[in-house]
Image (cartoon, rainbow, N blue to C red):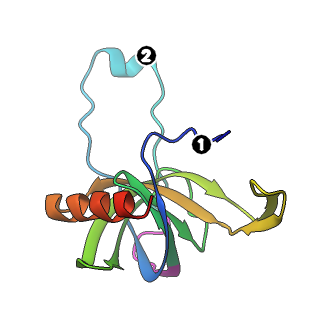
Amino acid sequence: MSHEKRQAHRVLLNCPTVIHPLPPADTAQGAGPDRSYERVVPSPHLVGQTFSAMVRDISVNGAFIAGEPLPLLTRVSFSFSLEGYGEIDALGWSLWRREHDTEVPDASGSMVILPRGFGVLFEAIPLDARIAINKFVSGAR
């Protein structure tokens, strides 16, 4: 029985990358209902820095980046190489993070290490790159 709850299949990948935190996207806030709730505002303190990391798995929707666990909602740019396609330039948002390496049992009961890092949701990648990722992930199943 599988406990996988993700909607998009993903495949393991070990590809070096450099993460570039970006300023938050400019979102206009007019008068009206925006005043009645608080928005999450990403921290701009990492903008201009770079972080070496590894793209550890990918899906058509995003990737897991092993390395410095960036604050939630940090907007990032990075690139990675995909077998059969080449270099992919991506923009995304950190949606979750793992502060420390964590040891957990796999399906067979063996212990595996999940590295520290963050999950990124792709904001923008070229359409042909997304199609190539889909083919790559589908072929790995």
User: Residue 106: image x %, image y %?
Assistant: 76, 57
Q: Secondary structure at mark 1?
A: loop
Q: Nearer the viewer, residue 102 or 68?
A: 102
Question: In the rendered image of this protein, does residue 113 appear above or below residue 36?
Answer: below
Q: Identify which residue is drawn at 30% across, 57% down.
A: 134
Quick check: can you spot residue 89? yes
Q: Amino acid at mark 2?
A: Ser
User: What residue is drawn where x is 51% and y is 42%?
Assistant: 6
Mark 1 nearby-residue class (10 Å; few <14, some 14–19, many ≥20)? few
Query: Which mark is in front, 1 or 2?
Result: 1
Which quarter of the picture shows residue 29?
Answer: top left
Where are the magenta residues, as a range? 45-53
| Mark before the other along the chain sequence, 1 or 2 | 1
Q: In this rendering, would 104 be left or right of 63?
A: right
Q: Position of residue 74 (x, y in %)?
A: 46, 57
Q: Can you say which quadrant of the picture contains the C terminus? A: bottom left
Q: Is residue 56 above or below residue 53?
A: above
- Name the residue nearer the viewer: 42 or 35: 42
Q: In the rendered image, is residue 101 in sight?
A: no
Name which residue type carries label 1.
Glu
Q: Main secondary structure of the magenta part?
A: loop
- Between the C-alphas of marks 1 and 2, the distance is 37 Å
124 lies left or right of 94: left
Q: Are marks 1 and 2 in contact (CB under 8 Å)?
A: no
User: Label for residue 36?
Assistant: 2
Residue 45: image location, x then y, percent:
50, 65
Disc marking residue 4: 1
Residue visible at 15% across and 63% down in the picture? 128
Residue name at image x 36 percent, y 63 percent:
139
Taking the magenta stretch, the answer to whether it contains residue 36 is no
